[in-house]
Amino acid sequence: AVHHRSIIWVLDKTAGDNIFDKYEFGKELGRGEFGITHRCTHRETGELLACKKISKSKLKTEIDVEDVRREAEIMRRLPKHPNIVSFKEAYEDKEAVYLVMELCEGGELFDRIVAKGHYTERAAATVTRTILEICKVCHQNGVIHRDLKPENFLFTDSSENAQLKAIDFGLSIFFEKGQRFSEIVGSPYYMAPEVLRRNYGPEVDVWSSGVILYILLCGVPPFWAESEEGIAQAIVRGSIDFERETWKKVSEEAKELVKRMLDPNPFNRLGVEEVL
């Protein structure tokens, strides 16, 4: 869908309109709904970075445009933090918006869970603490992530003790204290019940972190069904079981923490600070 009437300009401030003068594009690293991420090299310094290229032809509605604008704004707003992928600069030309950021080459948390089957309690605690630190930084800066899931965290490199970083703020939103939201966003397995009921706030990020902790400890999601509707029903029903063989080795404290992070009532649910 080419906009014949006029080119849409998405971002307010960019580093320019010719990213290819400054960076050389390399292999594709991943792709999302609107964007394809490539490895790129800074032509002068040789620095390796990642660049998310968002094609304007994919932005069909004003809402899509708004989402991309917000993603760039959120990445700019979040402070430098060891567990958040650092944003370098943005470019925009007629074809696309380009977000240049730090490169993480260690693969997704998702893939490590699959490779390991499940994590030891100590390793799971470390990962969960990192994810909650990320929530804390987001919330302190007026941002709800809304899409925390193992696919959205990358390791900096392939070593065992690589840093874990949040990479995708495509569904994140700015919020004021006390503000509630109603649009259903996120990924089925990780969605909090109040999202499905269309009345939610920052507590949804703790819920998603709790789902991730559950998966880290036993290797499968707490709410599972063949269809998205089925998953949604399971989430709203909200019964969590610890029946699988793998739970036998998990301490009562850990199970208790999972339960309190997955409290269906967002106001009784543990807060980020309390979990940490």
Image (cartoon, helix red, strand yellow):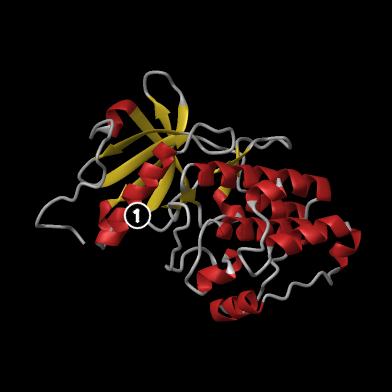
Residue 219 visible in the current orientation: no
Residue 225, above or below 68: below
Query: On the picture, is 126 further left or further right than 13?
Result: right
Residue 46, above or below 89: above
Number of residue marks: 1
- Given residues 135 and 158, the one toward you in this image is 135
Q: Identify residue type, mark 1.
A: Asp
Image quadrant holding the N terminus, namely bottom left
Tell me residue 21's x, y (percent).
Answer: 28, 27
Q: Kindly state the secondary structure of the residue where label 1 is placed.
A: helix
Residue at point 18%, 51% (across, down): 8
Residue at point 29%, 32% (across, down): 20
Residue 161 visible in the current orientation: yes
- Given residues 272 and 103, the one toward you in this image is 272
Query: On the picture, is 106 further left or further right than 175?
Result: right
Residue at point 68%, 64% (across, down): 262
In the displayed image of the protein, which residue is found farthest to the left?
A: 5
Local packing at callout 1 (Cα closer than 10 Å; few below 14, some 14-19, many 20+) is some
- Given residues 165 and 80, the one toward you in this image is 80
Tell me residue 41's x, y (percent).
Answer: 42, 29
Residue 270, above or below 238: above
- For label 1, the residue is 67
